[in-house]
Amino acid sequence: MKNNQEAVSTLNDLIEVSRDGEMGFKAAAEKAEDPGLKSLLQDRSRSCASATVELQNLIRSLGGKPDDTGSVAGAIHRGWTKVKAAVGDNNIAVLEEVERGEDVAKSAYAKALKADLPADIRQTIDQQYQGVLRNHDRVRDLRNQFRAAKH
C-alpha cells in the first residue's frame, strides 16, 4: 500500500502541474495577439486538460483520490502572465511566461520519473514528459522567431 500511496502522491503532484499548464496556456492564449499563436496555446491548454484526466484515471485505478485544484504557485504564475503580457510585445511576453511554466513542468515530470512507480504508470508519465519537452521546445522556438522578426 505504501507504494500505491507514493504513486498517488506523485500523480497528484503532476495533476497540479497539468492543471496549472491548462490554465496558464488558456490565459496566455487570451493575451496572445497572433492568431496562429493563440490557436497553438488553446490546443496546448486542451492537451494539458487531457493529461490531467489521464492522471486522475491512474490514481483511481490505484484506489486513490485525485486532487482537483491547481497549485498556489500556478495561480501566481498565471497572474504574472497576465501582468507581464499587458506591456511590451504581447506575443513575446506571453511566450516567455509560457516557457517559464514549461520549465516548471519539465522539472516536476523529471522528479516524478525518479519515484518508485509501477511500470505502466512510469510509462504514462514518460509519455506525458515527452509532450512537455515538445511543448517547451516549440514555445522556445516560437519566442525566438517572434524576437527575430521584431529586429
Image: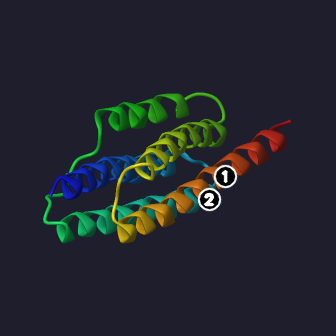
Q: Secondary structure at mark 1?
A: helix
- The quadrant holding residue 62 is bottom left
Q: Residue at x 48, y 35 (%)?
A: 81
Quarter holding the C terminus is: top right
Q: Reply above or below: 64 against 110.
A: below
Crowding at label 1, few (<14), some or many (≥20) Cα neighbours within 10 Å? some
> What is the distance, in whole Å, between disc 1 and disc 2 at their CAs?
5 Å
**Viewer-nearest residue: 9 or 57:** 9
Three-letter amino acid code at disc 1? Asp
Say if 30 sits above or below 76 in the image. Answer: below
Q: Which mark is residue 137?
A: 1
Q: Secondary structure at mark 2?
A: helix
Of the 4 image quadrants, the one containing the N terminus is: bottom left
Quarter occupied by residue 120: bottom left
Q: Position of residue 46 (x, y in %)?
A: 42, 64
Q: Nearer the viewer, residue 109 or 41?
A: 109
Residue designated by label 2: 134
Q: Which label sits on residue 28?
A: none
Answer with left or right where residue 70 lies relative to residue 76: left
Q: Residue furthest right?
A: 151
Q: Residue at x 18, y 67 (%)?
A: 60
Q: Position of residue 89 (x, y in %)?
A: 66, 35
The percent position of residue 118, horizontal first and vertical second, equals 33, 65
Using the rendered view, name the quadrant where residue 135 is placed.
bottom right
Does the residue at mark 1 contact the one at mark 2 (Cβ under 8 Å)?
A: yes
Residue at 64% of width from left, 61% of height from top?
36
| Amino acid type, label 2 | Arg
